[in-house]
Image (cartoon, rainbow, N blue to C red):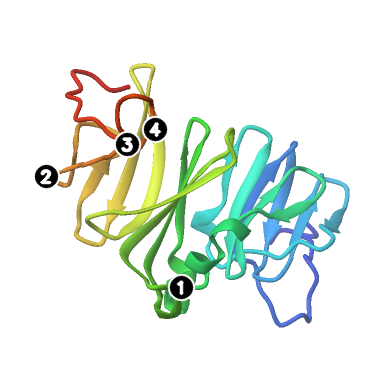
Amino acid sequence: WVGSNWFDARTNDGDFIRGLGNNDNKLLIFKRESVYKYDTREVKRIKGAPGTTSHRSIVNIREQTYYFHDTGVYRYDGVFSTLISRPIQDWIEGISVSNYPEIVAWSDGDLLYIYVGTITNTPRNISITNGIIIYDTAAQAWNIGNLNDSITVATTTIETNTRTIYLGTTGDKVLTFNSGNADISTPISFEAATIFHFPTKVYNIIEFDRCE
């Protein structure tokens, strides 16, 4: 570094910087067990906030910053960092420890996607390969799914005024996210459940011409 053009984010704690982010025009400095914010004048630790195991898990959606820690998914609102993944704790506990540094997250509108790899929680009868956690930040609802390949990186670009999300995989592929109707050539299936409607039944076979 040139001269004194640097600062410490707390030393002698046995931890090191895992990633950087931003929120409310402040630099966020993530260690594994702590987060600091820097506003060009001073560095302050965010009280009670754990850090992250993977810098690729840090994602902003509007004024919120989301990130993964081995205890779950956290949301930082500029003041406090809150654990939001308690409703899916069984799946969080099933994430392999070896995957912690490799967690990859990205956003698409109000949706937060977090690729976590293999999820195994035998007592809860959970076993998912290439698992992905999806959080609807507007509805505050969770969903768990899986992909056909391991995701290693995600990035967003603007091409001809169109926002495109690309995903890199361990299979040396670059995928366009949320495009088409197949997952690496495998058709994507879905199902819908409805409530009982008298005098018909709980389910009906319906052919969709279009789905948005």
Q: Residues within 10 Å of mark 4 (few under 14, many from 20)?
A: few
User: Which dot, 3 or 1, sits closer to the camera?
Assistant: 3
Residue assigned mark 3: 192
Identify whether 89 is placed above or below 185: below
Q: Secondary structure at mark 4?
A: loop
Q: Residue at x 22, y 55 (%)?
A: 148
Q: Earlier in the sequence, mark 3 or mark 1?
A: 1
Residue assigned mark 1: 94
Q: Quadrant of residue 64?
A: top right
Q: Earlier in the sequence, mark 2 or mark 1?
A: 1
Residue assigned mark 4: 196
Q: Secondary structure at mark 2?
A: loop
Mark-to-mark CA distance, 3 and 4: 13 Å
User: Which dot, 2 or 3, sits closer to the camera?
Assistant: 3
In the image shown, does 25 or 80 lie closer to the viewer? 80
Q: Earlier in the sequence, mark 2 or mark 3?
A: 2
User: Which dot, 4 or 2, sits closer to the camera?
Assistant: 4
Question: Which residue is most to the front?
Answer: 199
Mark-to-mark CA distance, 2 and 1: 28 Å
Q: Residues within 10 Å of mark 1 (few under 14, many from 20)?
A: some
